[in-house]
Image: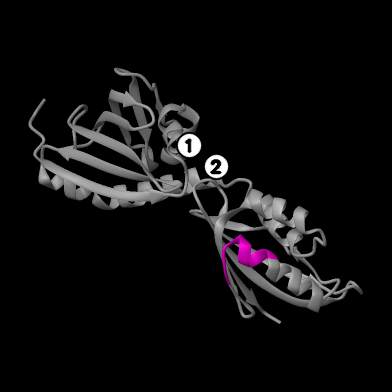
Amino acid sequence: MTPLPHRLDRTITIRAPRAAVFRFFTDPARWAAWWGAGSTIDARPGGRVVIRMPGGVEVTGEVVELAPPDRLVFTYGFTSGAPIPPGGSIVTIRLEPDGTGTKLSLSHAFAEAAARDQHVQGWRYQLAVFGNVVSDDVHAGAAAHVDAWFRAWSDPDAESRRRALDAVAAPGVQFHDRYSLLDGLDDVLPHIAASQRFMPGLVIARDGDVRQCQGTVLADWVATGPDGQPRGRGTNVFVCGGDGKFTSVTGFWRS
């Protein structure tokens, strides 16, 4: 192969465990989910790689190395056009644990500096798409977790509340709103008990669909009194760890 002295490097962090991230390199359907319809990968050394881009542009290559869940290496070149011939560059993707998430490091080696420079924005965009596709998969249950969080605020049983929040929130979860500055479940749980004492019968429930991007979830809510009438509305911002549990929650009241 022609020497490849010019390198493009990019690192991102994804709120998902390594095994969940790596399967998007080995499952053809998941590979196509972040590259586009018609893209595929034969996930074995020597296996064919196909990337279909908008406008009919096609990149092909071959898997050089596959070491789950740490590393994927493949050649990369265009079947038509001038930028890079088939087999003319090499992409290396490495995954490392980062707390409950994953640090992804990409290195793309080129023969020419001009071809490298043409790919800077492309990889910036494509890895953002990748992060969202992985996040949508890993955090598909975000709505159910949000509902469990809200239900806990009106659950009268202390043990039931703890079990519910243990299932959806990290032990050190932070909760902030106009009336709360809490650090950890051991702070949140007695605060919920106090809110039930001072606002008996108040029920908080999700109002509409959640919105999720890269592990951050927005959920509108409505608080109703014992008479079923609305007493307040707002939006909560939930930040998820790689295991799907909330690491922080911030509440905004609208009325």
Residue linked to disc 2 = 137
Viewer-side label of 2, 1:
1
Q: Is residue 107 left or right of residue 183?
A: left
Judge the density around disc 2: few (<14), some (14-19), many (≥20) Cα neighbours within 10 Å: few
Say which quarter of the image contains residue 149: bottom right
When the figure is inspected, residue 3 is found, relative to residue 160, above or below; the finding is above
| Mark seen at residue 76 | none
Q: For numbered disc 1, what is the local secondary structure? A: helix
> In terms of depth relative to the viewer, which is nearer, 147 or 189?
189
Q: Is residue 80 left or right of residue 113?
A: right
Amino acid at the residue labelled 2? Asp
Q: CA distance from mark 2 to mark 1?
A: 9 Å
Residue 254 belongs to magenta span: no
Q: Position of residue 185 (x, y in %)?
A: 61, 61
| Mark seen at residue 20 | 1
When the figure is inspected, residue 33 is found, relative to residue 250, above or below; the finding is above
> In terms of depth relative to the viewer, which is nearer, 233 or 119?
233
Asked whether residue 162 appears in the rendered view, the answer is yes
Mark 2 near mark 1, Cβ–Cβ under 8 Å?
Answer: yes
Query: Which residue does the image show at 92% across and 74% down from the upper left?
Result: 227
> In terms of depth relative to the viewer, which is nearer, 222 or 123?
222
Image quarter in which the N terminus is found: top left
Residue 187 belongs to magenta span: yes
Image quarter in which the C terminus is found: bottom right
Q: For numbered disc 2, what is the local secondary structure? A: helix
Judge the density around disc 1: few (<14), some (14-19), many (≥20) Cα neighbours within 10 Å: some
Query: Which residue does the image show at 35% across and 19% down from the upper left?
Result: 44
Say which quarter of the image contains residue 40: top left
What is the magenta range?
182-189
> In terms of depth relative to the viewer, which is nearer, 220 or 245?
245
Asked whether residue 247 appears in the rendered view, the answer is no
The total number of labels drawn is 2
